[in-house]
Image (spheres, rainbow, N blue to C red):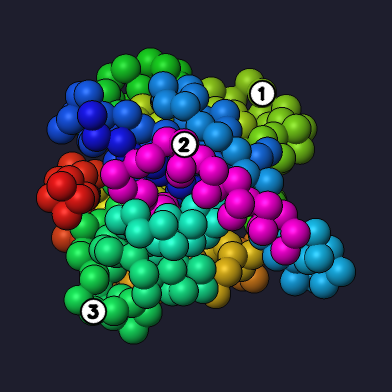
Amino acid sequence: MPKYLISGGGTGGHIFPAISIANALKARQPDAEILFVGAVGRMEMERVPQAGYPIEGLPVSGFDRKNMLKNIKVLFNLQRSISRARKILRRFQPDAVIGVGGYASAPVLRAATAMHIPAFIQEQNSYAGVTNKLLAKKAQTIFVAYDGMEQFFPKEKIVKMGNPVRQNLFDIALKAKEAYDFFGFSPAKKTLFVVGGSLGARTINESLTDGLQTLLESGIQIIWQTGKIYYHEAQKTAKEFQNNTNLHVSDFVTQMELAYSIADLVVSRAGASSISELCLLAKPAILVPSPNVAEDHQTKNALALVQRDAAILVTDQNARLQLVENILTLMFDNTKLKSLSENIAKLAERNSAQRIADEIIKRTF
């Protein structure tokens, strides 16, 4: 019976690819046993069991760049996590370990390579993080989503596969009628989908709050995913427009395939998974990269599209001044929407999870 251990998480951008890879391995090897390892208190501890897989947690967290004294505890917990990862590996005895990024990846991959267990890295971003760069030296293979990654990793270990995405997003063309009914929207009007990730994006939400009246007066329909943190504030804003049937506000859109199916334009952060979904679905997008990520990798992700005329970039700093204006200009420019859609579709990497699973199996057994 093949055994795989998948480590990482922290955000949907790490968790969804991890689950997609697990599903693909299961499809190839139905008798495979798969165990996840995540960080205690992070999103994966809830989402992975919901997807049907067991998960164990490590007491690991990120470094605090503002308060260096707090890092004493972080380093102590890192050592505890490496020790606990070794115990999990000895007990579970996986044939291979796959790290998808996030806090739990580092201790697990470090322990696995020290124990000579084949280790694979799936790097979602166009700019590799410090942890993956260090781990890459001992990894067997590194799966990447962007060109030019040899500046971070040994060239001979790189395999370009794209980022696995949520499988239920496909066949969105068949979902449009269901989506219009679900949101109570009209096919005769343009639809904007605003999404800031599962937790939300402060600047995107504030920009939408400032310009909501202007946007609704233009006649467009808006699906606004606020994220959990900003939902109550957004609800207060939306109350003024509670009789407006062109506005749908929620903290988290559980049926993303419905929102995407009718979106003429998407406003999003520039996380790797979000970009991969936009490419595969050929959706015109305005990207507002988060400034609060390591190595400013979201800006680099966005620029990889902008340089190919495949997306519009609005910086976080300028969003409150420029985002609504850009939405209104682009939403009614059908020629530009079509061009962005065609160009972003050219960047799509299809069947990533299945191809990664095949490569893991080939290189492990």
Give the image location of residue 198, x and y in percent. Answer: 56, 40
Name which residue lies at 21% across and 57% down: 161
Query: What separation in Å lies between label 1 and label 2 (alpha carbons)?
Result: 55 Å
Work out whether residue 79 or residue 252 is closer to the camera in this orientation and state it. Answer: 79
Name which residue lies at 46% across and 74% down: 134
- Residue that lies at the very extreme toward the bottom in this rendered image: 151
Instruction: Check if mark 3's residue and mark 2's residue have beta carbons within 8 Å.
Output: no
Asked if residue 125 can be seen in this view, the reply is: yes
Report the span colored magenta.
75-103
SS class of the residue under badge 3?
A: helix
SS class of the residue under badge 1?
A: loop
Instruction: Check if mark 1's residue and mark 3's residue have beta carbons within 8 Å.
Output: no
Give the image location of residue 226, x and y in percent. Answer: 61, 39
Image-quadrant location for residue 63 = bottom right
Please tell me whether residue 29 belongs to the stretch shown in magenta. Answer: no
Q: Is residue 177 above or below residue 257?
A: above
The label on residue 91 is 2
Name which residue lies at 23% across and 29% down: 1
Task: Please state if 84 lies on the left or on the right of 114 as rendered.
Answer: right
Give the image location of residue 110, x and y in percent. Answer: 48, 61
Observer-side mark, 1 or 2, equals 2
Q: Is residue 198 above or below residue 202?
A: above
> How packed is label 2: few (under 14 Cα within 10 Å), some, or many (20 or more)?
few
Work out whether residue 268 or residue 295 is closer to the camera in this orientation and state it. Answer: 295
Query: What separation in Å lies between label 3 and label 2 (alpha carbons)?
Result: 33 Å
Work out whether residue 39 or residue 237 is closer to the camera in this orientation and state it. Answer: 39
Q: Tag 1: residue type?
A: Gln
Answer with mark 1 or mark 2, whichever residue precedes in sequence. 2
Kindly identify which residue carries mark 3.
155
Kindly identify which residue carries mark 1.
242
